[in-house]
Image (cartoon, rainbow, N blue to C red):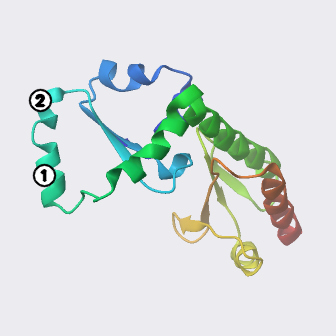
Amino acid sequence: MDGARFANAVVSINVSPADITWRAGVDVLVFGGTKNGLPVGEAVVFFNKALAEDFAYRAKQAGQLASKMRFISAPWLGVLADDVWLKYARHANAMAERLYQRVKDLAGAQVLFEPQANGVFVELPKAVREGLRARGWLFYTFIGEGGCRFMCSWDLLPETVDRLADDIVDLLS
């Protein structure tokens, strides 16, 4: 399982991590750290222990063995303790919901999907996209020309979401 946004999914659908991993038949989870507050690193969790048999060898052969792995691994202790990883995911999802609520009814903007986690997908006119970028906002476009992907992170401030929404409103008027 690609777990880049695993934490966001867990809190969004309000389930035990076990329910959507090993109980659902997942053999291996690559649990992303960078989208959950860590500077670098992913945790590879083997639920099917047989698949882990030669993992260390394969990782080393692929050049994925950091000489000071303990420094990459140590921050996981802080993120996993006291469910900090879930707190961060709840916050990111809440920021996406905040942005969604601000843009969903705007004339000239069309929300493409209701947010299910920490992303907001909205179609915006070219002038608005260009205006946002000119104001320093970074986002991806997809689905033809107008689809915009706004991802909300674990450390995104509500004031920043409000500034983005205000800029969208301003550029649409």
Quarter assignment of residue 94:
top right
How many numbered dots are placed on residues in this image? 2
Left of 81 or right of it: where is 103? Answer: right
Going by the image, does 135 lie left or right of 12? right
Type of amino acid at the residue the image marks with label 1: Arg
The quarter of the picture where the C terminus appears is bottom right
| Dot 1: element | helix
Percent position of residue 42, x then y: 38, 48
Vertical position of residue 86 compared to residue 170: above or below: above
Q: Image point 57% across, 48% down: which residue?
A: 37
Q: Which residue is mark 1?
A: 58
Measured as percent of width and height from the top left, residue 36 is found at 54, 45
Where on the picture, by quarter, is residue 151?
A: bottom right
* Residue at point 52%, 68% (across, down): 144
Residue 66 located left or right of residue 170: left
Q: Could you tell me if the residues under marks 1 and 2 are in contact, i.e. CB atoms within 8 Å?
A: no
Q: Quadrant of the N terminus?
A: top left
Q: Position of residue 114 (x, y in %)?
A: 64, 41
Q: Hey, what amino acid is under mark 2?
A: Ala
Q: How would you rate the neighbour count of disc 1 (Cα within 10 Å): few for under 14, some for 14-19, many for 20 or more? A: few
Occupied quadrant, residue 128? bottom right
Task: Report, in whole angstroms, how far the alpha carbon at label 1 lies from the one at label 2.
Answer: 14 Å
Q: Is residue 5 visible?
A: no
Q: Is residue 66 visible?
A: yes
- The label shown at residue 50 is 2
Q: What is the crowding at mark 2: few (fewer than 14 residues within 10 Å), some, or many (at least 20)?
A: few
Above or below, 16 relative to 32: above
125, 7: nearer the viewer: 7
Q: Residue 133 bears which disc, if any?
A: none
- Against 37, is 135 above or below? below
**Front in this rendered view, residue 105 or 63:** 63
Left or right: residue 36 compared with residue 133: left
